Amino acid sequence: MCVGKMSRNRFFGTKIGQIFKSTIRYPDFKVFIWNPHRTTISDVVMGRAESPRYDITEYVTSIGYAENIAFENKDNIEYPTCKITVVRDTNALPIQINERTLLDGTPIRIVQGDTRVPVEEWVPVFMGVIRGNPSSNQFSRKVNTGPAMEFVAVGREENYENSVVTAKPFEQYTDMGTVVVTSAIDYMQLDRREIDIGYQNYYVAHKQSQFVDIEVMKAMAQALQTVFKKPKFNSDGKLIACDSLFTKPPARVYENKDLVQSILRRQVGSQINNSVRLLGLRDAMTKIIERDQRITEGSITVGWFRRKVDMTVYMGDPAGESEGGQKVQETRMEHDFQGMTLGGDAQWYPEIEDDGYSVFQGRLRMETGYAPEIQMLMLIVYTALALEAAFAWVAKAFGMQGCLSNPPCDWYRALIGLARDMTMVAISWIMTRMGHLTFEIHGTPFQFAYQQLAATAELSGILTKDRKEIEIKNDWFYDLTYMQNAARILLKRELAKRWVYDIVMLDDALLEVDDVIVFTGSGVEGAEDENDMKFYINSIQKDITRKSPHTGIAKISAWRVS
Amino acid sequence: MVELQYPGYSQVRELSRDEIERHQKRFTGITVSAPGTKVIGEDENGDDVTEYVCDVRVGFVESWAIIRDVLVNTVAYGIIADKDVPVLMERNEAGRVSIIGRSRVALPGRESSNSLVFSTYTYADLDFVFMAELTLTGGLWKDGYGHLMASPQGVAGVSYRIDFICDVLDWNETDADDNFDYGTDQWGQTSCSWNHLSQDHIGNDEVAIESIE
């Protein structure tokens, strides 16, 4: 029944439903195909196929049906497969049965029923397409090979195995059902009528959420995991959200084991996960503050004629959206004028954003401390000394009378030259050193991020060396309390995998994978089945055939869950 | 909005793991006394209800501390108050006893910023009674061999198990590594330990211990 949107629950209480729960059976089946050149599987599912429906049952020898559980641990997309053996007959009616009719992509439907009930009331158990060309024995030395052909049909999931969602964003508070339905429409090209999924009452909580570069079925499985469901095509060919809880209503309650041939508990020869670590993402943005640290550094050298510097200093990453990107708060500057300031000064003016504390950049203003008068004075002194030295040199060169040409005046001339040179040295030194500033901007970087949440559920008393933990990451989870319960549910699922039962019983066509069934207890004290035994079906295999002894027998693999 | 102080730049996703590792490095050893029984109450018939108890010594890089009468299967919080590191002793349903350090690994910041929740469940908690290895008969928990066992209990809380464990498979003295030998000496020299333990517990096999992973 696979509670959710089922194709088979409509048969409960019907005559065919009762027959499949009884031991008196006249099982039969039908196989229909459609011309793939005239229609698609979508049209067939929606009942608008232009191609006639062709009944090829008469030529079908047997059908090997297999269905396994999907999306367990490894995100494995499983789909039902049918290995169908037919008789090749080019004169068959209404169409020939050969490689020209059983084409790749041919829509095919299988229904199971009972000869006492009209075909229209039978149970659809498979809807899919043929894959590849039929295999056919072309030549053999064996006798009685017959004109048999074999082909494989697969469920609709197969068609979307490699379909990828490139990018699909979702607004905050979008229902998870909407997430899945819109993704299926956009990236699986399904018609809304092919999707039987409604609101899930679980909402996208993060401000920004999206599927990015992920297979669409896996993406939907992740989204639906939040409500403990899985995406799946039912046997009508419609996409559904299948309930995967052990606590869902049982599809069948068998009050005795009349239908059962055997129930075997199978030993699982490997260690099963006994701890589940579920990772989610908090929906509220978390402000992450780092330690106070140096953000950036630099140096400034200015010359004689430039006393002031006003420059912009950037830090961290460029400004982005209001969330994300590195920002800094509580900034300050440490600086050094390399020993001499002479009244020089540097100031830091952070440019604070609208939020009152974010800083991406700031202005650094520096003054060398040179007063303009001092600059001019030094220039005048140097010029005067240079002129004086020049006059002394000219006077001596032309033998002019006066103290300038006398020996004492040689000393005077030398002193003037020395003073001039020292003034030049001083000017040069000041130009290079006093205009040199090194600075460091300090502050506390911070950023906003979604904080990771972790809920671990573990079996009591497990030692570290015995612990086998599975980590499940799903960013659609955002509430730690909800996750705690989810982790518990997932732990139950892992533990149940250690209790695998193989049930061989008369085929109940109403059962499918992910169904829960119950066998009422035997009441025999001390017996393992003294009380009710509840199972969760994880695979079904059956031969739908007219050949005995396999007629109407199904092999079910199930986890015991109660 | 939650504020986190100093978690390390761009390490949000690894915070949990890092924090656990940080705590883990502080542990140097753990020692356990022989188990004894302690009356913890009365049942409906007025009979004493007893549980196994042990004394546990937890060693840290900085110091160590002793916790008295730690119920097997029960978290004893606040053993080392300033470090807020509780110790859990558990006897699982197969009868093995483990000692688990649990830390309230709230991420740095306010208490409300907890992002981790750790829970343990017994089979009964999970409605998997048929998987249970112990059965309750006449008010007593017994294993399949008929041995008396402590009642299985699950634990839930805003905490995370630090990944070290002291595994006491039997109650004989166990060899351990050098670190532990050092710890044992310290244990014996403390005034509050050896004799007191011997008086308080049946069996009197002193310390069954193992090293820290």
Image (tube, grey):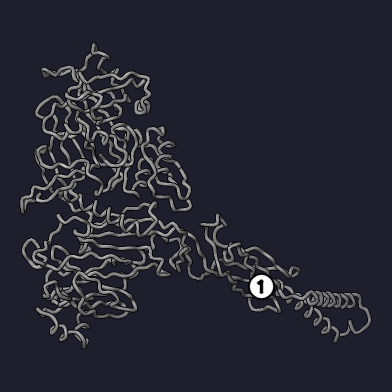
Q: In the image, what residue occupies the spot 33% across and 25% down?
A: A105
| Above or below: residue A260 compared with residue B183 | above
**Number of numbered discs on residues:** 1
| Above or below: residue B213 compared with residue A322 | below
- Quarter of the figure with the N terminus of chain A: top left
**Outermost right residue:** A401
**Outermost bottom residue:** B191
Residue B32: horizontal and vertical position, in percent?
18, 76
The kind of secondary structure element at disc 1 is: strand
Q: Circle 1 marks a residue in which chain?
A: A
Dot 1 amino acid type? Ala
Q: In the image, what residue occupies the spot 20% across and 64% down?
A: A461
Residue B144: horizontal and vertical position, in percent?
8, 61
Q: Specify whether A532 is left or right of A299.
A: left
Residue B75: horizontal and vertical position, in percent?
25, 71
| Above or below: residue B99 compared with residue A525 | below
Residue B27 appears in view: no
Q: Specify whether A241 is left or right of A409.
A: left
Q: Quadrant of residue B192?
A: bottom left
Q: Quadrant of residue A346?
A: bottom right
Residue topped by disc 1: A346
Q: In the image, what residue occupies the spot 13% across and 83% down?
A: B198
Q: Give the class, few, some or many, for how many residues have Cα within 10 Å of label 1's Cα (few <14, many ≥20).
A: many
| In-front residue for pair A531/A264 | A531
| In-front residue for pair A372/A184 | A184
Q: In the image, what residue occupies the spot 31% across and 25% down?
A: A107
Residue A412 appears in view: yes
Residue B15: horizontal and vertical position, in percent?
39, 63
